[in-house]
Image (cartoon, rainbow, N blue to C red):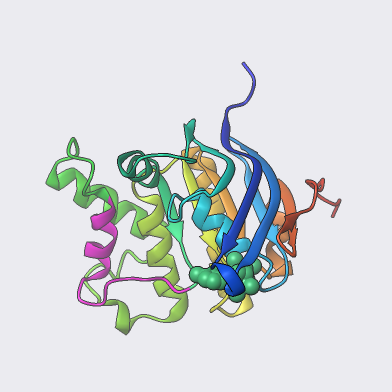
Amino acid sequence: MPPRQVVNINHLNHVFGKGELRKPVLFDVDLNIYAGEIVIMTGPSGSGKTTLLTLIGGLRSVQSGSVKILGQELYGASKAELVQVRNQIGFIFQSHNLLSCLTVEQNVRMSLRLHRDIDFDRRTQITTHILEEVGLGDRLNFYPDSLSGGQQQRVAIARALVSKPQLVLADEPTAALDSKSGRNIVEIMQQLAKEQGCTILLVTHDNRILDIADRIVHMEDGRLAKDMALVDH
Ligand code: ADP
Ligand code: MG
């Protein structure tokens, strides 16, 4: 059996605004990502990386071209179909978007709310386990504001991965961290992804983490350069 395509994008274009404010941002983008791959996307600020990630995540409607995610075509997809796709994706953003009124444990547990088949005790178990894996087993009842930036980002990773999503989209997840914590974060992501067999698309400017990728793609002025083979280290 050929490897399964998790992301299959063909001739994708995207334009913001209308009339005088019309601004084309993505041009004829093609991208294929297969199950279990870790792909890093680099490229200058303003080149369209976040726009592409939000289209892949079903957070923005596809205007032209084809975006198939986990077998679902997003062009012309209904709201329900978009929600269905979003629920299979773990999102990690540059700013972690944790809810400050919930504890670390509650923030992560929230990601399991759609899994009606998992009972309360099992949720506690799964949540505790993933927080231990990201090194926060002793912070379960802390509130996000009392944690460091690196710790908050680790909570965000636990939250994105706890439901074992098939696809993880990470937009500059290490941008707010010093290089050591940044490295630590992506190594945790890589390890959890390998354990769970999920696929990762990670946007970064950080040259020090490129080696975790199976493949690197480069965005420049809204165009995606042909897939580059990973350079030898
Ligand atoms: P990157 O993530 O590579 O920095 P973005 O995808 O955020 O790039 O942005 C690409 C271009 O689209 C930029 O010129 C940005 O100003 C523009 N842009 C992004 N979001 C919007 C929006 N909601 N409305 C209008 N223009 C936008
Ligand atoms: Mg961006």
- Please state if 178 lies on the left or on the right of 102 as rendered: right
- Residue 47, located in which quarter of the rendered image? bottom right
- Over which residues does the magenta segment extend? 95-111
Work out which residue is located at the far left of the displayed protein and give it: 120
Measured from the top left, where is residue 155 in percent x and y? 37, 66
Q: Residue furthest top?
A: 1
* Residue drawn 79% across the image and 52% down it: 225
Identity of the residue drawn at 55% across and 56% down: 53
Q: Quadrant of the C terminus?
A: bottom right
| Nearer the observer, 42 or 145 | 42
Percent of width and height locating residue 166? 46, 40
**Residue 98's spot in the image, x, y percent?**
33, 71
Nearer-the-camera pick, 221 or 152? 221
**Residue 88 versus residue 154 in the image, above or below:** above
Q: Is residue 119 left or right of residue 197?
A: left
The answer to whether one can see residue 192 in this image is no
Quadrant location of the N terminus? Answer: top right
Question: In the rendered image of this protein, does residue 41 appear above or below residue 96?
Answer: above
Q: Is residue 113 magenta?
A: no
Q: Is residue 101 magenta?
A: yes
Asked if residue 131 lies left or right of residue 186, the reply is left
